[in-house]
Image (cartoon, grey):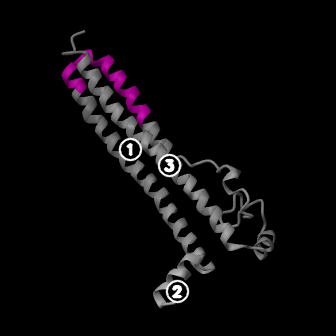
Amino acid sequence: MSNGAAAVGAAEAGATKQERVDFLKQVIAFNEANVRAYDLKAQISLAAFVLSGNPLMAIVNGACGAGARNVLVISIVVFVATIITFLWVLWPVASSNPKLTEGLDAKNLFYLPNPLTSGGAQYAERLKGLAVEPELTAEALKLSYIRSIKARRFKHALIAMLAAYLVIVAAFFAVGRCAF
């Protein structure tokens, strides 16, 4: 058997324990970075959207004057609803479903759900029976779950923002030259 064939055979056999642990650490770091990125994107998009509100309202008010009340009310309602969707992206994700980590034999030692309920001695005792792979696997799955929730929320916020702009433009043109 040549060296190349031996390397292929070894690669097919699977990764070593250290390679699996390193892989899981990278998955965790990647997922954490993605969650932070969605939060940052939502913050930037929210700031840009809020800053766009003043010129939009000024345009509507300038074009319609006192007759702009209906358009302004519609615009403000849509505007506030869109802001709430961006804030929903930033809102913490609830605990993942226990079925997500079912059968992994993970003991939730990576991120403690409530550190006040487990004292230092109890935590140290639980660490003695630590199996690294199941703990890292559970955390990678939990973070992937959080990432998918944040991604869905961000997508909905972007759709809400587009819809808000379309509703505001449609409301503006629906009143014609603002003659009521």
| Secondary structure of the residue carrying numbered label 3 | helix
Quarter location, residue 103: bottom right
Query: Is 125 located above or below residue 33 in the figure?
Result: below
Q: Amino acid at mark 3?
A: Lys
Name the quarter where the C terminus is drawn. top left
**How dense is the environment of label 1, judged by Cα within 10 Å: few (below 14), some, or many (20 and up)?**
many
Decide whether residue 177 is among the magenta residues. Answer: no
In the displayed orientation, state which residue is furthest to the bottom: 2
Where is residue 4 shown, x and y percent of the image?
46, 86
Residue ID for mark 2 = 6
Name the amino acid type tagged 1: Leu
Disc 3 packing (10 Å; few <14; some 14–19; many ≥20)? many
Is tag 1's residue or tag 3's residue first in the polypeptide sequence?
A: 1
Q: Which residues are magenta?
A: 60-82
Left or right relative to 171: residue 91: right
- Look at mark 3 in the image and give the residue it sits on: 150
